[in-house]
Amino acid sequence: MKKLNRRTKVLLLTAVMALVLIAVYAFGLLIPEEAYASSFLQAKQPPSFAHPFGTDSLGRDLLMRTLKGLSVSMTVGLVASVISAVIAVLVGIAAATGSKYVDAFLNWLIDLVMGVPHTILVILISFAMGRGLKGLLIGIAATHWCSLARLIRGEVLQLRNQQYVAVSRRLGKSSGWILCNHLLPHLVPQFFVGLVLMFPHAILHEASVSFLGYGLPPEQPAIGIILSESMRYLSAGMWWTAVFPGLLLVAIVLLVDRLGDHLRRILDPYSAQE
């Protein structure tokens, strides 16, 4: 009974965290531009009932702008994470099923990408691709697949040695049939868990690169842009312009990270029996 209760609690907690994230994301998408429009009569106001996060130097409501920026950052992080996870699966399968030369080359490529700090590599790729949303997406997607690719490679190497795979080969099944019916179904949990765990890293890298001025354009209400703008007014005592957006960003990242850990516990056959 105790084991059932523990698993039920994990499932309920996972559902609650997912609903919170979906609610924050959906609410941010639905916020109209009028909700955070400039109003110089209300500029530089500290937190109050009318403006819980205060207003910035242009009189824009910081709560509405932060929620809108979170939805933008989450969109960029989600799209980049999906692309990166797909790349990881393709590279992992190619390394495990290809020749030893293909495996050696892909392992060398993984070591090369992992050997360069992600932020620097994202900035270089984003700058080379013309900055903006396109360059940022390509930069994040091209730098976050390595760890998951190694995990997929190891999983495929183990699956190839399983008895039912050998039986399928003896029965004349093609490599494509074995891949679709034996390998890919076992990789689905790793794909989704890896995708969720990459998501917070992608959000943080989007925010950091935009903060440095190499990501989204300044007119875009992204978290990195909001934090970058707040640096100009911290010395003037406008602490709320950096504290509240930063805390909300950290809270969302930690929530997504915990969601990934709970999904891993649910989908992993070993931890699922705890």
Image (cartoon, helix red, strand yellow):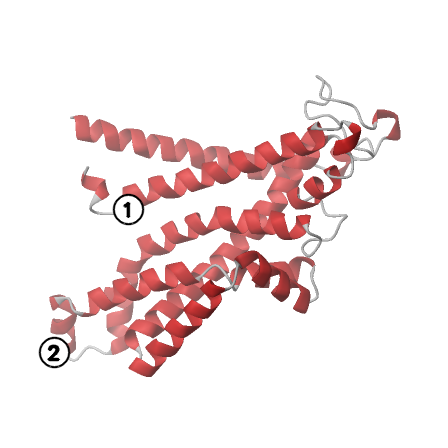
Residue at 43%, 59% (x, y): give it.
Answer: 85
Q: Say whether residue 34 is left or right of residue 224.
A: right
262 relative position to 144: left or right: left
Q: Which mark is residue 170?
A: 2
Callout 1, which amino acid?
Leu
Q: Residue at x 69, y 53 (%)?
A: 216
Q: Nearer the viewer, residue 45 or 243?
A: 243
Task: Give the image location of residue 260, x and y in percent.
Answer: 39, 43
**Badge 1 is on which residue?**
267
Quarter of image, res 70: top right
Q: Residue at (54%, 55%) from the top-left corner?
A: 79
Three-letter amino acid code of the residue under disc 2: Arg
Q: Quadrant of the C terminus?
A: top left
Q: Quadrant of residue 265?
A: top left
Q: Is residue 195 above or below residue 116?
A: above
Marks 2, 1: nearer the viewer: 1
The x and y percentages for residue 202 are 53, 51
Mark 2: give few (<14), some (14-19) or many (20+) Cα within 10 Å. few
